[in-house]
Amino acid sequence: MPSLPVVFSGIQPSGAPHLGNYLGAIRPWVVEQAESRNYFCIVDLHALTVERDPAQLADQTRELAAVYWACGIDPAHSTVFVQSHVAAHAELGWLLTCLTPMGWLERMTQFKEKARGEQAERVGAGLFTYPALMAADILLYRTELVPVGEDQRQHLELARDLAQRFNHRYGETFVVPQPRIGHLGAGSRVMGLDDPTTKMSKTGGQEAGCILLLDPPDLIRRKVLRAQTDSGREVAVEVAGPGVANLVDIWRAVTGASREDAGRCFDGRGYGELKRRVADALLEVLAPIQDRALALLRDRAELDRRLADGAAVAQPVAAGTLARARRRLGLLSLPGG
Ligand code: AQP
């Protein structure tokens, strides 16, 4: 029997998980998890790239774990763990940082966007070097496929470049991973409901523009009904402006409908009807996820135990790859190590 491809992906506990995280990442993970050997990480070290309240970071880490499982991540196929529980991430992150030219990092648009408006000398160095840590996350598991949203395409290219650079300089060590973006059709770039020209995000934009997966149902409905649309009145799917196109995309991603289905359902209808249908579809999908997540969050000890189990699976795999990279670089092992 051919062995299953390895998949790795992760989300930062940098805020409550939102609809973009679900449609761009978690949902594709769930849909395809039976076809691969999966590692789904809560990348808490990445969340430290900006200042955080420690108690809030701990809560958000558990919340994200609960959301992963509540969305349908199945322990039979997928290992869920916290990045900082596996020390190899930080160590390989450093080794790869040393291999990364400044110019590669300077080209990263996400860094430019996040650092915009901040005084350069106040931005944490971690925000700049974070793509090298992300490369380490992926490469440690000999990952072949990385399912992510569109916004991560550039970081993934950098991970591939780093794997190739290391292999070329020091000998075959890392598997060069492939991105997996947008293959389910819709949802790989969910835009803000208040401003459909910027992506829905945990930390950028206004609260009204971002649907959190654990928002109360009436709040979700309100946010959708207030979403910015276009200057016209009726939907025309093929020529929709950014606001309507975003709502149609969300509806398609949640229902699995094609663009043609969307045209048949909404062309010639008013924006109000489109919004009501999007809200209904969202609530239908999110209600059971919310119930399961809240139940999981009530038992903190069980959540922590599950995360410890995940780390125990991930740790030896990561340690094996790290040991190989260390040997290639000429770093000494301890006697008997
Ligand atoms: N708007 C989005 N549409 C589709 N996919 C998205 N993702 C994020 N936003 C959208 C995908 O979610 C995964 C995890 O992202 P992350 O938390 O590691 O970092 P991010 O991309 O920077 O997400 P945020 O919400 O914007 O976080 P902050 O505000 O902290 O930077 C990735 O697969 C990403 O593509």
Image: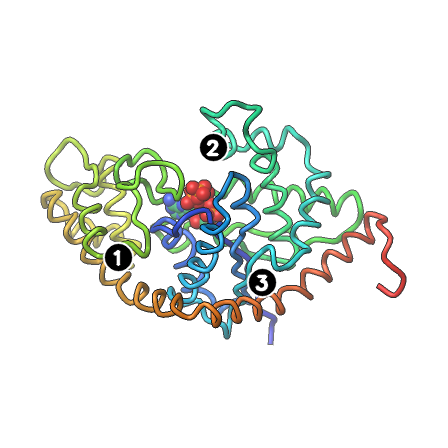
**Image check: 213 left or right of 88?**
left
Q: Secondary structure at mark 1?
A: loop
Query: Looking at the rendered structure, which numbered label has been put on residue 169?
Result: none
Closer to the chain start, of discs 3 and 2, is 3
Q: Nearer the viewer, mark 3 or mark 2?
A: 2
Q: Is mark 2 within 8 Å of ligand 1?
A: yes
Asked if residue 227 is positioned above or below residue 143 in the image, the reply reads above
Residue annotated with mark 3: 6
Within 10 Å of disc 3 (Cα), the crowding (few <14, some 14-19, many 20+) is: some
- CA distance for labels 3 and 2: 31 Å
Residue annotated with mark 1: 257
Q: Is residue 282 visible?
A: yes
| Contact between labelled residues 2 and 1, with CB atoms less than 8 Å apart | no
The location of residue 163, given as percent across then percent down, is 68, 47
Residue annotated with mark 2: 114
The location of residue 133, given as percent across then percent down, is 62, 45
Q: Amino acid at mark 3?
A: Val
Q: Secondary structure at mark 3?
A: strand
Q: Is residue 150 visible?
A: no
**Image check: 198 left or right of 284?**
right
Dividing the image into 4 quarters, which one contains the N terminus? bottom right
| Contact between labelled residues 1 and 3, with CB atoms less than 8 Å apart | no
